[in-house]
Image (cartoon, rainbow, N blue to C red):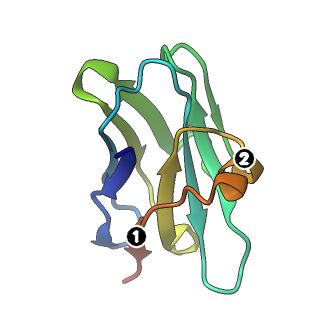
């Protein structure tokens, strides 16, 4: 079995922080980029951040630049998304995948359960 499991979501006030984790079960992360995505009900899933297999290259959506940081620890088989200065518009279900290409993940039907982040007062 090959699976990524998201965790760390919850409810936080605006301006607060959360750290999401993406843990691999059944495989190692050494050869994979990791993408974080999010989806609000009624809207398309969107890319949030991406990190390459070695961790040496990262990208961010404009909406989260300066606030979110993606990282990984391949030995621990975990990737992270540190989310600071959270805004209500960050409220969504967050997903991770072994690709930064949302279309590729869709084609593989590889989305997991995700973890819910709620930012509200």
Task: Give the number of the mark in front: 1 or 2.
Answer: 2
Where is residue 72? Give x, y as percent: 38, 27
Q: Which residue is mark 1?
A: 117
Q: Secondary structure at mark 2?
A: helix
Q: Which residue is mark 2?
A: 104
Name the side, left or right, on which 9 lies relative to 71. left
Q: Residue at (41%, 44%) from the top-left corner?
A: 81
- Dividing the picture into quadrants, the one containing residue 42 is bottom right
- Dividing the picture into quadrants, the one containing residue 23 is top left
Report crowding for label 1: few under 14, some 14 to 19, many 20 or more residues within 10 A (C-alpha).
many
Whether 22 is drawn above or below 46: the answer is above
Q: Residue at (35%, 26%) from the top-left corner?
A: 28
Quarter of the image for the C terminus: give it.
bottom left
Q: Secondary structure at mark 1?
A: strand
Where is residue 97? Give x, y as percent: 52, 46
Name the side, left or right, on which 61 lies relative to 90. right
Report crowding for label 2: few under 14, some 14 to 19, many 20 or more residues within 10 A (C-alpha).
few
């Amino acid at each position: 079995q090959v699976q990524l499991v998201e965790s760390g979501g919850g409810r936080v006030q605006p301006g607060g922080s959360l750290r999401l984790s993406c843990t691999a079960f059944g495989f190692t992360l050494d050869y994979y980029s990791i993408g974080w995505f999010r989806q609000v009900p009624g809207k398309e899933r969107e890319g949030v951040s991406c990190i390459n297999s070695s961790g040496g290259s990262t990208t961010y959506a404009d909406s989260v630049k300066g606030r979110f940081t993606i990282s990984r620890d391949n030995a621990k088989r975990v990737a992270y998304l540190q989310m600071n200065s959270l805004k209500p518009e960050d409220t969504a279900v967050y997903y991770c995948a072994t690709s930064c290409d949302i279309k590729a993940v869709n084609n593989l039907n590889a989305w997991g359960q995700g973890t819910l982040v709620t930012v509200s007062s």
